[in-house]
Amino acid sequence: MNIVQKTALVLTIIGALNWGMIGLFNFDLVATIFGSMTIVTRIIYTLVGIAGLVNIMLFFVNLDEMVVIDNRERAK
């Protein structure tokens, strides 16, 4: 996994946890910390959305092949 994928995964997890809190407790942590629909909040929501799009590629990649290629590169 490269840095873009790891960053996307972290942002996706943050977004999922925030949506979980909204669903369970009606509490939006991002809006509470940064304000309701401020520019910072909108940037965070946008980054989480882009991260979700980046993670869609996991449906189209054979992860077993990816690990084998990664191990070969490390052996060089």
Image: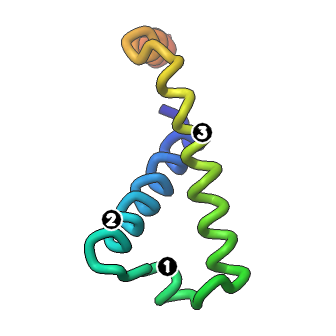
Q: Is residue 68 visible?
A: yes
Q: Counting residues from the N terminus, which is met first, the one under dot 1 or under dot 3?
A: 1
Relative depth, front residue between 74 and 43: 43
Q: Residue at x 48, y 11 (%)?
A: 69
Amino acid found under the numbered disc labelled 1: Val
Nearest to the eye among marks 2 and 3: give it: 2
For this view, does 66 lie left or right of residue 27? right
**Marks 1 and 2, how far apart at CA:** 12 Å
Identity of the residue furthest to the right in this view = 39
Q: Residue at x 40, y 55 (%)?
A: 13
In the structure shown, which secondary structural element does the residue marked by tag 1 occupy?
A: helix
**Marks 1 and 3, how far apart at CA:** 21 Å
CB within 8 Å, label 1 to label 3: no
Residue 28, quarter of picture: bottom left
**Marks 2 and 3, how far apart at CA:** 21 Å
For this view, does 43 lie left or right of residue 56? right
Give how far across and how far down residue 55 sits, in percent. 52, 37
Residue to which mark 3 is pinned:
54
Amino acid found under the numbered disc labelled 2: Gly
Nearest to the eye among marks 1 and 2: give it: 2
Residue to which mark 1 is pinned:
30
Task: Give the answer, above or below, for where 50 lies relative to 5.
Answer: below
In the structure shown, which secondary structural element does the residue marked by tag 3 occupy?
A: helix
In the structure shown, which secondary structural element does the residue marked by tag 2 occupy?
A: helix
Residue to which mark 2 is pinned:
20
Q: Residue at x 26, y 71 (%)?
A: 24
Give how far across and how far down residue 61 sits, in percent. 50, 17
Identity of the residue furthest to the left in this view = 24
Report crowding for label 1: few under 14, some 14 to 19, many 20 or more residues within 10 A (C-alpha).
some
